[in-house]
Image (cartoon, rainbow, N blue to C red):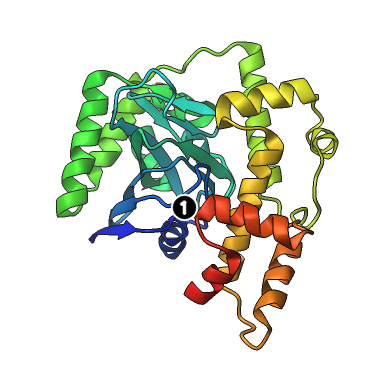
Amino acid sequence: MELSLPYSDPLQISETLNEMGQLTRITQFDSGAGNYSMTHSMASGISIAEIKASKTLLYEGWGTDWSVDFNWITPLKNSLAPMGICEGYEMKANSLGGLNTYNGSKGGSWGKYSPLCSSTACMLDKASLMEAMIACNAQVGIENLTSNKGLEVSDQLSHQLKRLARKDLQAGISNPSKYYDLIICCLEDGKPRAYKKGETKNHALLSEIVRLSHDTTKMSSPMTLADVCHFLNTGQASLYRVCQKYFGMGIIEMMMQVRLEESRRALLRYQDQSAAEESMIREVAIQYGFKHAGRYARRYFNSFGELPSQTLLNA
């Protein structure tokens, strides 16, 4: 089955991913309206989705019980800056990320991608993949899969994998075994990127930052920088440096954007139609840590180009 859809809102992509079994929440980091598209194809033991967006998007919560969710990017423009991050692994043109979803928990993965690239996720049945690797004695591949977040693969293998996915995203997947064969070759041939000790520590901190930002048990409480440092057990200088490098903003601004996006999701799903509009908006704002209605409305408008009341009308 193959499906290609345009979207006017990243929340719509999130809903489609949820229907596919990926309980993914998406936060747009850049303000204003954008253009988005997702092309999806699936067959027995495999699912592929390619997403393009005109805004920087943060994905949180993907990962299933049954699959390894491999990930790669396709640059759309030339840039020396990193175009994507998959679980802390900086994604380049020949990178294969998402390996840690083999051992990861359901919904425990995240990634951030710029509008300079498309991002492709290829979900393979983890039991079938491991069975195939054992059958062909792919010991290096098994070691890479079970101990690394990402790999750098050869130009030839990267090109073959992307060409196959492009063809099947247009015409439908005719031979799922080709993906298993190619991915095993990538795992056998790929090389882990060498990181310094401090960089590895930063990657662990990145994941903690994303999880804290999406922690629904803490969203109703406004958090100070001191609060965040306490929860993450890190210093302000380290936190500032990591957030600026990988997210392009401070931690408080990032958490604010995640909460705004989640509040928008809540407004679009608001069920109590008997409540007054002002009461609805106040309730949702407080739920996501915004105690001042006027400031919430201004921040909301700056991010989405419409007021909370307009979102309710569009729900």
Q: Secondary structure at mark 1?
A: loop
Q: Amino acid at mark 1?
A: Trp
In the picture, which quadrant includes the N terminus?
A: bottom left
Image quadrant of residue 298?
bottom right
Residue 259 on image: x %, y %: 65, 53
Residue to which mark 1 is pinned: 66
Q: Kindly give the residue lying farthest to the bottom in the view shown.
A: 274
Q: Nearer the viewer, residue 298 or 40?
A: 298
Q: Residue at x 33, y 19 (%)?
A: 189
Q: Is residue 127 above or below residue 194?
A: below
- In the drawing, does residue 158 fall left or right of residue 296? left
Determine if residue 175 is in view: no
| Residue for point 56% across, 50% down | 302
Q: Residue at x 67, y 21 (%)?
A: 241
Q: Is residue 116 left or right of residue 143?
A: left
- Residue at 57%, 56% (x, y): give it: 301
Question: 60 above or below 150?
Answer: below
Q: In which quarter of the view is residue 232 placed? A: top right
